[in-house]
C-alpha cells in the first residue's frame, strides 16, 4: 500500500536526527526516519564529540557556534536527556611559521563574537602544564571548548522527535537507485521484494532533474578536486570504485590539487600522491580562503569578484586548456564539466 510522507530522512546519526527533530519540532508535516541500525549506531556514535568553533572559514565557524549553543543549552533547546557536554577548553598549537595566520584567524573569529585568544608559550604552559612546547610558538585558545556525548545526543533527539510524531523505520537499509537502468532496476526490485517476503519499500521523490541525467549527460570531463593528503587518497579510491560500479567511466577523470603549497602541514608530495592514486595530477589550484569565504558570504562567484587573483587565473586557465571551445558552422559549442570537491 502506498504511503506518503512530507520528508524522509535517511540516517539516524547526529545530522539525520538533528534534522528529524527540527522538522518535528516545527510541525513540518509527516516525517519518516530510515536507518539500517539503531540511533547513533554508526560513525556518530563512535565519535569522541569534540566541541570547538575554531575554523578558518567564517561560514563553518558560524555553523559551529550555532551547534555549540544547542549542545551547551541542551535542556532548553531539546528538552530531554543531556548532551554530555564537558567544558575543558580547546587549544590549537602552531609553529612559528603559522603564528601570523593563527592570529589573523583569531581576529576573524572574535569579529564573529567567539571568545578566543592567542596564547604565547608561557601562557600555554600555564593553561596545560603537561604539554611539551618543543616547536610550539603559540596557540589559539577557546576556553568554552570541550567535548560532548554523541550517543546521548542521538538518543535525546530521537526520543523527543518520536514523541512529536516521527515515523521511525529502524533496521531498514536504503539504496539510491536513480542512476540505474530502469529495466534493470525493475528486475532488481522484484527480486528483492520476493527475497524479503514483501518487506521492500520503494521510495519515489518529487523534484527536478536527477544529477546523472542533468549533469553526466552533458559533461565532458570529471574534475576531482582534493588536497594532497592521505585522507584524500582514500576518498579518491572510493570515488573511482563508485564510478566504475555505476558505469560512468566513459568520462575522463582529472585530478586537481587544491590548497597546494610546498610546505603546508599535513600535505604529501605530488609524486607520492600520484603514485598512491595511480594517476597523474592534471592541475594545481592555489586556494584563497579569504576570497572563497567572501564568495560564500555574498553568494557571488569568486572568479567574478576578483578575476585577477591567483585562484581565479589558475582556475580560468585550467578550464580553458581542458575544455576550450569548438566551433560548428561558426557557432561556439559549449562544453561542460562535473566538479567533485574533497
Image (cartoon, helix red, strand yellow):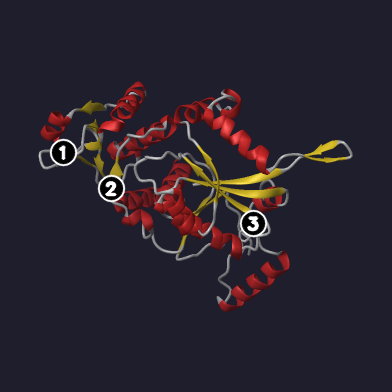
Q: Label 3 to label 1, Cα distance in Å?
A: 57 Å
Q: Which residue is drawn at 46% across and 58% down?
A: 276
Q: Label 2 to label 1, Cα distance in Å?
A: 39 Å
Which circle, 2 or 1, is nearer the viewer?
1
Give the left or right position of residue 107, taking residue 269 as reference. left
Give the quarter of the figure containing the N terminus: bottom right
Q: Label 2 to label 3, Cα distance in Å?
A: 35 Å
Q: Which of marks 2 and 3 is nearer the N terminus?
A: 2
Q: Residue at x 45, y 55 (%)?
A: 233
Q: Residues within 10 Å of mark 3 (few under 14, many from 20)?
A: few
Q: How crowded is mark 2: few (under 14 residues within 10 Å), some or many (20 or more)?
A: some
Q: Position of residue 170 (x, y in %)?
A: 45, 62
Furthest toward the front, the residue is 271
Query: What label sits on residue 133 in the rendered view?
Result: 1
Q: Where is residue 115 in the image (x, y as percent from the top left)?
A: 27, 26
Q: Earlier in the sequence, mark 2 or mark 1?
A: 2
Query: Looking at the picture, does residue 103 appear above or below residue 228?
Result: above
Q: Specify whether residue 164 is in view.
A: no
Quadrant position of residue 323: top right
Q: Position of residue 53 (x, y in %)?
A: 33, 35
Q: Earlier in the sequence, mark 3 or mark 1?
A: 1
Find disc 2 in the rendering and name its residue. Answer: 81
Query: What label sits on residue 282 in the rendered view?
Result: none
Find disc 3 in the rendering and name its residue. Answer: 204
User: Badges 3 and 1: C-beta atoms under 8 Å apart?
Assistant: no
Query: Looking at the picture, does residue 170 appear above or below residue 255?
Result: below
Element type where label 1 sits in the image: loop
* Observer-nearest of 167 and 73: 73
Q: Position of residue 337 (x, y in %)?
A: 66, 45
Element type where label 3 sits in the image: loop
Amino acid at each position: 500500500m502506498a504511503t506518503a510522507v512530507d520528508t524522509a530522512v535517511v540516517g539516524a546519526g547526529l545530522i539525520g536526527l538533528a534534522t528529524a527533530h527540527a522538522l518535528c519540532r516545527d510541525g513540518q508535516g509527516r516525517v519518516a526516519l530510515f536507518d539500517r541500525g539503531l540511533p547513533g549506531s554508526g560513525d556518530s556514535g563512535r565519535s569522541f564529540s569534540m566541541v570547538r568553533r575554531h575554523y578558518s572559514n567564517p561560514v563553518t565557524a558560524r555553523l559551529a557556534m550555532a551547534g555549540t549553543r544547542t549542545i551547551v543549552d541542551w535542556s532548553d533547546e531539546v528538552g530531554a536527556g543531556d548532551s554530555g557536554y564537558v567544558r575543558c577548553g580547546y587549544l590549537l598549537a602552531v609553529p612559528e611559521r603559522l603564528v601570523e595566520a593563527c592570529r589573523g584567524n583569531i581576529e576573524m573569529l572574535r569579529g564573529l563574537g567567539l571568545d578566543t585568544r592567542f596564547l604565547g608559550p608561557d601562557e600555554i604552559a600555564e593553561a596545560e602544564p603537561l604539554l611539551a612546547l618543543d616547536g610550539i610558538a603559540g596557540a589559539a585558545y577557546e576556553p568554552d571548548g570541550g567535548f560532548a556525548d554523541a550517543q546521548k545526543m542521538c538518543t535525546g533527539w530521537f526520543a523527543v522527535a518520536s514523541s512529536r510524531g516521527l515515523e521511525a523505520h529502524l533496521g531498514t537499509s536504503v539504496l539510491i537507485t536513480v542512476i540505474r537502468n530502469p529495466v534493470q532496476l525493475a528486475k532488481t526490485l522484484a527480486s528483492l521484494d520476493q527475497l524479503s517476503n514483501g518487506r521492500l519499500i520503494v521510495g519515489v521523490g518529487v523534484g527536478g532533474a536527477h544529477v546523472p541525467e542533468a549533469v553526466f549527460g552533458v559533461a565532458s570531463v570529471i574534475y576531482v578536486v582534493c588536497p594532497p593528503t592521505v585522507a584524500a587518497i582514500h576518498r579518491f579510491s572510493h570515488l573511482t570504485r563508485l564510478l566504475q560500479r555505476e558505469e560512468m567511466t566513459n568520462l575522463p577523470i582529472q585530478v586537481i590539487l587544491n590548497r597546494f603549497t610546498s610546505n603546508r602541514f599535513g600535505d604529501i608530495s605530488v609524486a607520492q600522491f600520484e603514485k598512491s592514486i595511480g594517476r597523474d595530477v592534471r592541475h594545481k589550484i592555489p586556494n584563497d580562503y579569504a576570497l572563497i569565504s567572501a564568495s560564500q558570504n555574498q553568494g557571488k562567484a569568486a572568479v567574478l569578484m576578483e578575476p585577477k587573483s591567483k585562484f581565479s587565473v589558475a582556475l580560468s586557465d585550467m578550464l580553458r586548456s581542458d575544455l576550450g571551445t569548438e566551433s560548428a558552422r561558426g557557432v561556439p559549442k559549449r562544453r561542460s564539466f562535473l566538479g567533485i570537491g574533497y
